[in-house]
Image: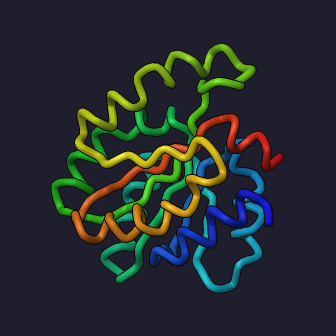
Amino acid sequence: MKISQKIISKLKDGGVDFFLSVPCKLLANMITILEADKEVFYSAIPREEEGMGICAGAYLGNKLPCIMMQNTGIGNSVNSIVSLLQLYQMPIVFLISYRGTPGEPVGAQGAMASVTEEILNTLRIPILHCNKESDIHKIETQSKHAKVIEGPVAILCNFDLMKDDQ
């Protein structure tokens, strides 16, 4: 089973039933799988901040949403995370392709990689690192944790893990 399929399975096992994504090469296989999955809702979105609002609506509609994005999307979304999701205690799973980590060939991705964890820590968002395939089993627990803490959680999938899925 491909890494993408394993990740989606663990998200679904954790209760996620609503998925959004911003285009990302490392998430392409997951997007293809979700487009064909009739058990969950999936939609592409143009910007992460818009996705935060859509996820809030999905949560109010009794869904556990997941937004899939690059780590740059966290920087784009700080205000909507704090003033919407955290203020109103909305559990959302952030599945993040952690661009700029070892193995990344695009140098421009390194700048955001150097501050991604600091931003998430500043926002007090719990982080799960998926650096290797054996870390994927923890995704189910992290997804369920969003409901327990009534707020966002982050799953960082580093470049080396995701490039093996291509």
Task: Residue 41: give x, y in percent of width and height.
Answer: 58, 76
Viewer-proximal residue among 55 and 160 = 160
Q: Identify the residue at horizontal 16%, vertical 55% (top origin).
A: 87
* Colour setup of the view: rainbow
Q: Is residue 48 above or below residue 147?
A: above
Q: Is residue 91 above or below residue 52?
A: below
Q: Quadrant of the N terminus?
A: bottom right
Which quarter of the figure has residue 106? top right
Q: Is residue 54 left or right of residue 28?
A: left
For the image, the number of numbered tags is 0
Q: Identify the residue at horizontal 46%, vertical 74% (top origin).
A: 14
Farthest left residue in view: 87
Viewer-proximal residue among 105 and 135 = 135
Q: Is residue 97 left or right of residue 147?
A: right
Viewer-proximal residue among 106 and 79 = 106
Which quarter of the figure has residue 142? bottom left
Task: Residue 54: give x, y in percent of width and height.
Answer: 42, 63
Q: Is residue 151 left or right of residue 35?
A: left
Task: Residue 86: give x, y in percent of width and height.
Answer: 21, 54
Q: Identify the residue at horizontal 75%, vertical 20% (top origin).
A: 105
Q: Is residue 37 above or below residue 131?
A: below
Farthest front residue in view: 134
Q: Identify the residue at horizontal 71%, vertical 25% (top origin).
A: 103
Which quarter of the figure has residue 55? bottom left
Q: Is residue 10 left or right of residue 62?
A: right
Task: Residue 83: give x, y in percent of width and height.
Answer: 20, 48
